[in-house]
């Protein structure tokens, strides 16, 4: 599998308004507009970008279990406005989010297979055939869906220069920030933990990130920002409570 050489994760909740003067384009792309065989999943991909923002980094938001993307665009408006105000483009990515990891990997199942949650996330994120407990097809996994969407936007929205977020046949992770709510936050954290290439201080951040997500899961969710081993000059990894535990 491809390794990610540079990865920035931010899972946070902020409340700040986007500048009223900013000209924001909103696009909706149905997965079936890209590939007729893709599952409809949680609705269309919802894309926000400011006009003439060709140098903007990209923030991907993964909704929680049952989180329809169009509804998420409304309920997470403060989050989206914050990201836009800070110079990001935003994609609320439609992906298969049911059943949730916790619904599949029950206490009984996990007792028999402690790696159940890892296998489900591996399949849902990358499309690997790691478990038969969910029926997600490989092309419906999160990374393939994101890659297909970026390729589609590069062709359909040429002025947006979406090709800059691609590196060959995979996303250019150095230009992308992942965020998520509930199950989506867990998926984002797993993606960084599994394939992020960290050394030295970053290795500690990777471990602390996992512990923070597990803590959120066990505690039923927290509502405050928790900095995770952020040092001088490095990428900030932050975990924040967002109404629900990681799914």
Image (cartoon, rainbow, N blue to C red):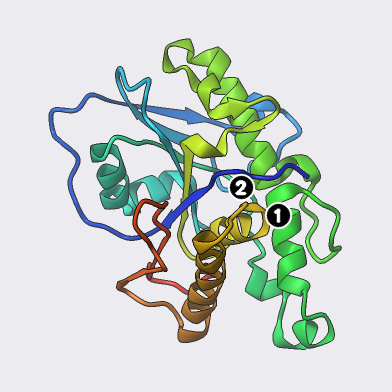
Q: CA distance from mark 1 to mark 2?
A: 9 Å
Classify the position of the N terminus by image quarter: top right
Asked where in the image residue 118 lies, by quadrant, the reply is bottom right
Residue 237 screen position, x and y as percent:
42, 59
Give the position of the C terminus as an image quadrant: bottom right
Q: Position of residue 140 (x, y in %)?
A: 72, 43
Residue positioned 57% across, 63% down in the render: 203
Which mark identifies residue 67? none
- Do we see residue 45 in this rendering? no
Q: Which mark is residue 124?
A: 1
Q: Residues within 10 Å of mark 1 (few under 14, many from 20)?
A: many
Instruction: Tell how many labels.
Output: 2
Q: Decide which of 166, 136 is in the foreground and name it.
A: 166
Q: Is residue 104 visible?
A: yes
Sequence-earlier tag: 1 or 2:
2
Find residue 73 and report its image quarter: top left
* Residue occupying image coordinates x 76% and y 33%: 37
CB within 8 Å, label 1 to label 2? yes
Q: Which residue is mark 2?
A: 95
Is 65 above or below relative to 117? above
Look at 65% across and 38% down and name the residue there: 145
């Amino acid at each position: 599998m491809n390794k990610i050489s540079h990865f920035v994760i931010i899972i946070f909740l902020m409340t700040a308004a986007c500048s009223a003067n900013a000209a924001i384009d909103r696009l909706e792309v149905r997965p079936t507009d890209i590939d007729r065989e893709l599952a409809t999943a949680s609705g269309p991909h919802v894309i926000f970008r400011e006009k003439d923002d060709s140098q903007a980094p990209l923030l991907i938001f993964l909704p929680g279990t049952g989180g329809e993307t169009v509804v998420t665009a409304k309920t997470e408006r403060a989050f989206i406005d914050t990201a836009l105000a800070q110079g990001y483009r935003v994609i609320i990515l439609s992906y298969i989010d049911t059943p949730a990891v916790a619904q599949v990997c029950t206490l009984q199942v996990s007792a028999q297979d402690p790696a159940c949650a890892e296998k489900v996330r591996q399949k849902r994120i990358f499309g690997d055939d790691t478990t038969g407990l969910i029926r997600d097809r490989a092309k419906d996994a999160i990374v393939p869906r994101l890659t297909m969407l970026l390729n589609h936007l590069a062709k359909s929205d040429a002025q947006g220069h979406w090709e800059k977020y691609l590196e060959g046949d995979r996303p250019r992770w150095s230009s992308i920030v992942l965020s998520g709510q509930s199950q989506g936050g867990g998926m984002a954290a797993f993606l960084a933990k599994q394939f992020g290439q960290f050394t030295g201080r970053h290795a500690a951040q990777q471990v602390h990130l996992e512990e923070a997500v597990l803590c959120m899961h066990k505690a039923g969710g927290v509502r405050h920002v928790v900095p995770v081993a952020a040092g001088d000059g490095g990428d900030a990894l932050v975990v924040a409570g967002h109404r629900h535990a990681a799914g």
